[in-house]
Image (spheres, rainbow, N blue to C red):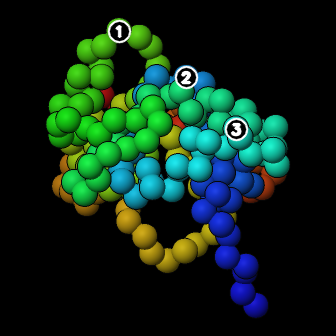
Amino acid sequence: MTQPEESPRARSSPTHPRAPLHPRWLRYVPVHLLGRRLYETMPYWETADQDPSLSDADREWTALWKPLPKVVFSTTLSAVQGNARLASGGLAEEIERLRAEPGEGDIAIGGATLAAEAAALGLIDEYRAVVHPVLVGGGIPFFPRHERRVDLELVETRTFASKVVYLRHRVAR
């Protein structure tokens, strides 16, 4: 038996049954760094508030996502939409610049390739993993292969009714 194909909107929806935390954590993020592939799944949310069929939960997500500053890392895009800009430097330089700016909150990194690069550079202070009860057998790894061991301290864990498990670890320094 095959599953019906989900629309890009459904797959990127923060209220998708396998995305239980998005609106909660997004409230505390001052900027979101995205790789090109992830960025290209998100354009719907820039105008979703105009969709009369939008659920209340998706409307809440849109109200948080739309004004959120986004930095897109791409070597192929020449322009981005909404409250996004193309990165002007490398990942390390961009994160250093953002950390120097006034304000509080975590810098979110989305996209497997970008996250792996940040991990390899030692730029991640905290890992927040959402583990879904599905094995897909492929994809781009979030964790780079390298010789350096990274010890983590468990900060928080939750299990949701959907059997999704949220794990929050701080890098032990």
Q: Position of residue 48 (x, y in %)?
A: 67, 43
Please provide percent x and percent y for residue 16. 71, 54
- Residue that numbered label 1 is attached to: 102
**Disc 2 target residue:** 28
At 51% across and 56% down in the image, what residue appears? 41
Q: Are marks 2 and 1 in contact (CB under 8 Å)?
A: no
**Could you say whether the residue bearing mark 3 is in a helix, strand or loop?**
helix
**Where on the picture, by quarter, is residue 119?**
top left
Q: Secondary structure at mark 1?
A: loop
Relative placement, left or right, of 66 versus 163 is: left
Q: N-terminal of the two: label 3 or label 1?
A: 3
Cβ atoms at labels 3 and 1 below 8 Å apart: no
Looking at the image, which residue sits at the far bottom? 1
Q: Amino acid at mark 3?
A: Asp
Q: Is residue 78 left or right of residue 47?
A: left
The Cα–Cα distance between marks 3 and 2, rounded to whole angstroms, is 21 Å
- Mark 2–mark 1 Cα distance, whole angstroms, equals 14 Å
20 displayed left or right of 69? right
Q: Which tag, 2 or 1, sits closer to the chain's start?
A: 2
Mark 3 sits on what residue? Answer: 49
Q: Is residue 102 visible?
A: yes
Residue 155 on image: x %, y %: 54, 31
For image coordinates 29% across by 40% down, the residue present is 86
Q: What crowding class fits label 3: few (fewer than 14 Cα within 10 Å), some (14-19), or many (20 or more)?
A: some
Q: Residues within 10 Å of mark 1 (few under 14, many from 20)?
A: few
Vertical arrangement, residue 154 with respect to residue 147, above or below: above
Above or below 99: residue 22: below
